[in-house]
Image: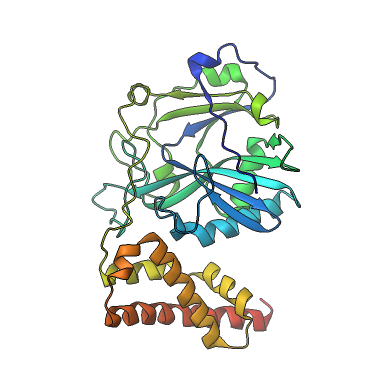
Amino acid sequence: MRFRPFLKMSSAGDARGQASPSGSWVALEKLHGAQLVLGVQDGAVHFGKRKAWLEEGDSFFGWQLLRLSLRNAALKAVRTLELGDARVYLYGELLGGRYPHPEVPAVPGMMPVQTGIWYAPDLHWVLFDILVARSDEDEGVMLSHRDVETAAKAAGVLAPPLVARGTRAQLEAVPTRAPTRLPAMLGLPPLADNWAEGLVIKSEQPVAPGTRAAFKRKIEEFDEARFDESTAWDAHQRLSIAELQDWSSRLVNPARIASALSKCGRADVEAIVSEVELDVRVDLELAFPTACQSLDPASEERLSARVRELARPLIRQALDAAGSGA
């Protein structure tokens, strides 16, 4: 699948001569993180950063920890919008990794994707745009933000906080400075002086990517480049066996069970358990290679045993639900 980078957006001052189509516009909170694009073609999902597709073992903020859930989300978004065999690019922001609030526990192994704004203690992916192309040669169409909202809701992922909807003239009056709205969407308590980066203001008309009217406005601190876009992911950090077991409890979930069932069928429970165990261990080792490679044989078995312990009741629930027709 051809990689297509997201086109750079003009800043407000550079966009004054930009065409201003009539109709609805949206002002969205501009999120501060690392871009992660999901590409879907013929049922396969590809993952990429800003300029290229990611290889399975690439170190990029522990993206493998979200890989299964985002794969399912991408496929559901494409089905919801009835895009068939098109090449679909879901552009999103990977963010989170730290939330310095005394009532919010840190997540083991997480590092902040961004500095200067705090969104969540764990990783999240927020869908902000969708490009659809019918062939590798087709320039494609950027879908309307209403389609983005529809796809995000159906796929169970977030879209950027909507600040306002109206004409371009009305949105010009929306204040740039405001606290970030994302933590509240995630049910987190507020932090003092946790300002949003700014706004993205764009037309809602579906158009070719090179002709869409859109621009960004940043608060002064970000225009002065006082905050980095992201911090480096440390693939060599050491996690304890207890912390790796904690990650197992996050990764053994209904989506993981469904994936195993699709590969193994429903006849052999232990085969399904083994598939879940392998799947979780692979993702842990890709995200935290040094920690996993440092385990002694006893700890290896403790980690695998924990995965199997977590998987069995979820597998039984899935099989019972299938048997009852639920």
* Residue 220 position (above or below residue 321): above
Give the residue drawn at x 44%, y 22%: 175
Q: Quadrant of residue 288?
A: bottom left
Give the side of residue 80 with respect to residue 33, left or right: right
The answer to which quarter of the image holds residue 108 is: bottom left
Horizontal side of residue 160 vs 95, given as left or right: right
Q: Is residue 7 in sight in this rendering?
A: yes
Q: At which x and y percent is residue 95?
A: 41, 45
Q: Position of residue 31 (x, y in %)?
A: 45, 36
The image position of residue 163, as x and y in percent, is 51, 31
Quick one: which residue is furthest to the left in this view? 102
Q: Residue at x 49, y 71 (%)?
A: 279
At 48% from the left and 28% from the top, the residue drawn is 199
Give the answer, above or below, for where 135 lies relative to 107. above
Task: Give 298 or 24, whichever is nearer the viewer.
Answer: 298
Q: Nearer the viewer, residue 146 or 11?
A: 11
In the image, residue 160 above or below residue 174: below
**Closer to us: 256 or 168:** 256
**Coloring scheme used:** rainbow
Placement of the C terminus among the 4 image quadrants: bottom right
Can you give x and y, in whole percent of width and height, for residue 46 in the image? Answer: 58, 53
